[in-house]
C-alpha cells in the first residue's frame, strides 16, 4: 500500500458518532521476534525448596550479616537515561515504521496515555459506562505496554496468569500455562484490543510530550511528537510503573564495538548462537533471560552485583482436567484475583494454592493465632523471622543445586525476603553448572569498566561479541511527570520536588484537575498483582467521570488538606514497614527515596477503606 493510501486510511470519521477513528497499528518488524517463557520441569528436586534449618531465627548475628551486605553496596547504584548517544537503545525494534498520518488539531473527552493493561482495562470499563469519546496515545507500535516492550527470550509473568490476565471471563479465555509467556500475554492484549474496538481509538507511535492545563477552557492541551495538539477534558496517565529503561553508568560503555542492547529492546537481528555474550544485572529480567540464552550461546558471562532470591516456579500447563475441577462460577477470574489478594504473605505467587484460588476450599492455610493482639513492632518482628526462614531455604536451595561452592556462595542473597523483588525460576540456578556459563561476582561495586572488546573486572578482561544490559527501569514512571503542567504552570515533578510526592489515593494531585494517575506513586488497592491495581483504578476513574457528569460539574480536583493527610499516611505506612525492606533496591530508590514517595505500603484493604470513605463523604474533592 502506498504512503498516500495509508495516510488517508489512518484517520476516518465514525458516521454514527462523528468521532475520529484510527488505523495506526504498526506491523511487526520481523518474524524473528518469537519465543517462549518458562519450561515445565520434571525434576522434582529442582522445584522444591529445602526445609528451613531447625530453630532458624533472625538473631543479632544474622542481622549484622544482613546489615554488612547492605552497607557494602551503599552508593554503588549509578544509572543513566537512554539519551544522547544511547538514545538509539530506545528505538522501537518490534514494529515497522510508524503509519503515516496528518497531525491532529482537535478535541476528545478523555485522553489516555498508554496502551498496556491499564489502558485496555480502562477502555473496557469506560466503554461499558457509555464514555466512547476516548483516545489513547501510545509510544509503541501496538498494544501491550510492558508486554510490548519486553520480549526477551524466557519472558513470562510471575503472578499466576489466571489472576494476572485481565478480562478473562469477558474474553472467554483461559491461559495455556500457570505462568503464561510474555508472547502469549502480548497476543492476548492484541485479542482484547481487537474484540473491544480499542485499535480504532489509539494513536500508535505517538509520544505525548506536553500536557498543559488551560484553566479558562477547562481543558488539557496534549501535544505529541507527531505534531498533534489535542484538547481533552480528562487525561489519564496509564503509562506504567516500570516504563523508562535505564542503563548502568559504566566508564567506557560507549566504546564497546560489539552489539549491545537493553533487555526491553531485544534485538532479534543479533543471532546469539555461538557467540560470547555478557549480561549485566541479575534482577527479575536476567533471571528469566539467562537460562534461555545459555541454551544457544558459546559462552555466557553473568555480571552480578547483588544476587536475587530465586524461589521455585513449578510451571504447569493448564489442562482440561484441572480446569474441569474448578467451580464454574460467574466472574471466576475476578473472584480468583480477589482470593489471591487475600493472601498477604510475601510469597503470594507461589502460595497461590490452587484449591483456595479456584474456590474449592475457603481458607488457604490455618491462620496463626496469638494469645494476645501483637503490637505493630511485634508483628514486623514475626514477619522478619518468617522471612528469614524463607531466605534460609532459598540459600539452602543454592547450595543444593549449584556445584561450585564459590559460585554458590556468590549466588546467596542476604536481605529480608521481598526486600528486593523476589524472583522465581527452576532453571536459573542449574544453568551455572554448565561449563560455558560463568558467574562474575562484581559485588559490591558492580561493573565499573567497559572497553571496546568487552568488560574488565578486577583486572580480568572478558571479551564479548554481545553485551546485554538487564539493568532495569525507572520505578513509578517518574519520566512523564515533568511534562504535565497544572494550574499556575507548575509541573507535577516540580510540585513533588519542592513539596514531596503528594497525591490523593495516588490518583489525583491538587492543582491538576481532571488528571488521573493509574498505578503511580502512592497508588494502592491491589497488593502484589498490578492487574488488580489497574482494575481498581479503572473502576475509580469511571466513578469520578460519572460523578462529575451527574453533578453537572466540569472539573474534579482534590483539596490540599486531603492530599497532605494522605501523603503523611503514606510516609507513616512506609516507615512502619521499612524494616521489612531494609536493603537497597529500586523500591526505595537504592536507599535514596523519601518515605512514602514511591509505592503505597498501607496494604490493599486500607487503600480501599480510604477510597470508600472519600467517595461517601466527598470531602476530599473539589467539583467545579
Ligand atoms: P532490576 O532493576 O530489578 O535489575 C537491575 C539489575 O542490574 C540488578 O541486578 C542490579 O544490581 C544490576 N546492575 C545495575 N548496575 C550494575 C552494574 N554496574 N554492575 C552489575 N550489575 C548492575 O531490573 P529488571 O529488568 O531485572 O526488573 C525490573 C522489574 O521489572 C522487576 O523487578 C519486575 O517488577 C519487573 N519484571 C517482571 C517480570 C515478570 O513479571 N515476569 C519479569 C521481569 C521484570 P543491584 O541489585 O545490585 O542493584
Image: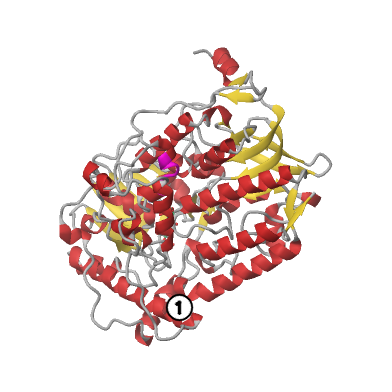
Tell me, yes or no, if residue 94 can be seen here: no
User: Quadrant location of ligand 1?
Assistant: bottom left
Residue at image mark 1: 380
Residue 610 against residue 97 in the figure, above or below: below
Rendered residue at 38%/53% (across/down): 159
In this figure, what is the number of numbered marks?
1
Residue 349, magenta (yes or no): no
Looking at the rendering, the stretch of residues picked out in magenta corresponds to: 164-169
Residue 569 against residue 97 in the figure, above or below: below
Closer to the camera in the image, 33 or 312: 312
Rendered residue at 49%/61% (across/down): 586
Tell me, yes or no, if residue 16 can be seen here: yes
Closer to the camera in the image, 490 or 172: 172
Label 1 CA crowd tier, 10 Å (few <14, some 14–19, many 20+):
some
The location of residue 535, given as percent across then percent down, is 51, 49
Q: Is residue 285 left or right of residue 21?
A: left
The location of residue 7, given as percent across then percent down, is 58, 18
Closer to the camera in the image, 139 or 180: 180
Amino acid at each position: 500500500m502506498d504512503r498516500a493510501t495509508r495516510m488517508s486510511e489512518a484517520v476516518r470519521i465514525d458516521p454514527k458518532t462523528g468521532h475520529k477513528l484510527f488505523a495506526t497499528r504498526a506491523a511487526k518488524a520481523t518474524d524473528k521476534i518469537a519465543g517462549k517463557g518458562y519450561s515445565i520441569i520434571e525434576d522434582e528436586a529442582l522445584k522444591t525448596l529445602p526445609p528451613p534449618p531447625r530453630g532458624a531465627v533472625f538473631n543479632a548475628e544474622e542481622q549484622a550479616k544482613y546489615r554488612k551486605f547492605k552497607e557494602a553496596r551503599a552508593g554503588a547504584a549509578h544509572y543513566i537515561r537512554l539519551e544522547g548517544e544511547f538514545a538509539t537503545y530506545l528505538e522501537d525494534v518490534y514494529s515497522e515504521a510508524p503509519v503515516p498520518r496528518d497531525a491532529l488539531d482537535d478535541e476528545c473527552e478523555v485522553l489516555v496515555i498508554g496502551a498496556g493493561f491499564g489502558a485496555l482495562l480502562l477502555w473496557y470499563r469506560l466503554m461499558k459506562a457509555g464514555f466512547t469519546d476516548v483516545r489513547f496515545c501510545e509510544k509503541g507500535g501496538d498494544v501491550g505496554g510492558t508486554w510490548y516492550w519486553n520480549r526477551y527470550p524466557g519472558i513470562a509473568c510471575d503472578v499466576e496468569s489466571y489472576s494476572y490476565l485481565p478480562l478473562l471471563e469477558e474474553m472467554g479465555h483461559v491461559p495455556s500455562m500457570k505462568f503464561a509467556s510474555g508472547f502469549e500475554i502480548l497476543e492476548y492484549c492484541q485479542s482484547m484490543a481487537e474484540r473491544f474496538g480499542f485499535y480504532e481509538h489509539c494513536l500508535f507511535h505517538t509520544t505525548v510530550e506536553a500536557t498543559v492545563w488551560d484553566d479558562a477552557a477547562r481543558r488539557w492541551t496534549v501535544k505529541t511528537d507527531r505534531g498533534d495538539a489535542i484538547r481533552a477534558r480528562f487525561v489519564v496517565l496509564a503509562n506504567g510503573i516500570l516504563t523508562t529503561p535505564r542503563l548502568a553508568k559504566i566508564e567506557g560503555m560507549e566504546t564497546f564495538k560489539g552489539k549491545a542492547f537493553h533487555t526491553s529492546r531485544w534485538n532479534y537481528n543479533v543471532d546469539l548462537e555461538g557467540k560470547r555474550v555478557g549480561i549485566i544485572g541479575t534482577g527479575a529480567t536476567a533471571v528469566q533471560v539467562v537460562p534461555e540464552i545459555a541454551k544457544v550461546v558459546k559462552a555466557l558471562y553473568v555480571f552480578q552485583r547483588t544476587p536475587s532470591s530465586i524461589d521455585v516456579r513449578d510451571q504447569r500447563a493448564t489442562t482440561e482436567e484441572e480446569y474441569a475441577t474448578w467451580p464454574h462460577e460467574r466472574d471466576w477470574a475476578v473472584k480468583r484475583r480477589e482470593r489471591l489478594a487475600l493472601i498477604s504473605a510475601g510469597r503470594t505467587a507461589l502460595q497461590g494454592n490452587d484449591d483456595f484460588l479456584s474456590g474449592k476450599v475457603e481458607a488457604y492455610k490455618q491462620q496463626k493465632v496469638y494469645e494476645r493482639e501483637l503490637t505493630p513492632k511485634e508483628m514486623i518482628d514475626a514477619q522478619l523471622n518468617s522471612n528469614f526462614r524463607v531466605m534460609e531455604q532459598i540459600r539452602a536451595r543454592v547450595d543444593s543445586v549449584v556445584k561450585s561452592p564459590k559460585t554458590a556462595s556468590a549466588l546467596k542473597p542476604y536481605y529480608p525476603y521481598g526486600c528486593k523483588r523476589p524472583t522465581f525460576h527452576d532453571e536459573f540456578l542449574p544453568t551455572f553448572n554448565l561449563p560455558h556459563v560463568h558467574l562474575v561476582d562484581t559485588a559490591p561495586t558492580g561493573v565499573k569498566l567497559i572497553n571496546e572488546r568487552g568488560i574488565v573486572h578486577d583486572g580480568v578482561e572478558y571479551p564479548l561479541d554481545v553485551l546485554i544490559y538487564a539493568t532495569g527501569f525507572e520505578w513509578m514512571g517518574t519520566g512523564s511527570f515533568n511534562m504535565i503542567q497544572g494550574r499556575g504552570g507548575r509541573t507535577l515533578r516540580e510540585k513533588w520536588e519542592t513539596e514531596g510526592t503528594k497525591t490523593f489515593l495516588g490518583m489525583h494531585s491538587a492543582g491538576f484537575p481532571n488528571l488521573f494517575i493509574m498505578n503511580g506513586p502512592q497508588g494502592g488497592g491491589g497488593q502484589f498483582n498490578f492487574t488488580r491495581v489497574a482494575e481498581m483504578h479503572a473502576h475509580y476513574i469511571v466513578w469520578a467521570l460519572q460523578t462529575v457528569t451527574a453533578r453537572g460539574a466540569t472539573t474534579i480536583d482534590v483539596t490540599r488538606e486531603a492530599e497532605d493527610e494522605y501523603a503523611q499516611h503514606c510516609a507513616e505506612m512506609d516507615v512502619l514497614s521499612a524494616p521489612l525492606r531494609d536493603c537497597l533496591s529500586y523500591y526505595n530508590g537504592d536507599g535514596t527515596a523519601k518515605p512514602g514517595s514511591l509505592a503505597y505500603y498501607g496494604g490493599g484493604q486500607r487503600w480501599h477503606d480510604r477510597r470508600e470513605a472519600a467517595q461517601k463523604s466527598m470531602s476530599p474533592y473539589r467539583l467545579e
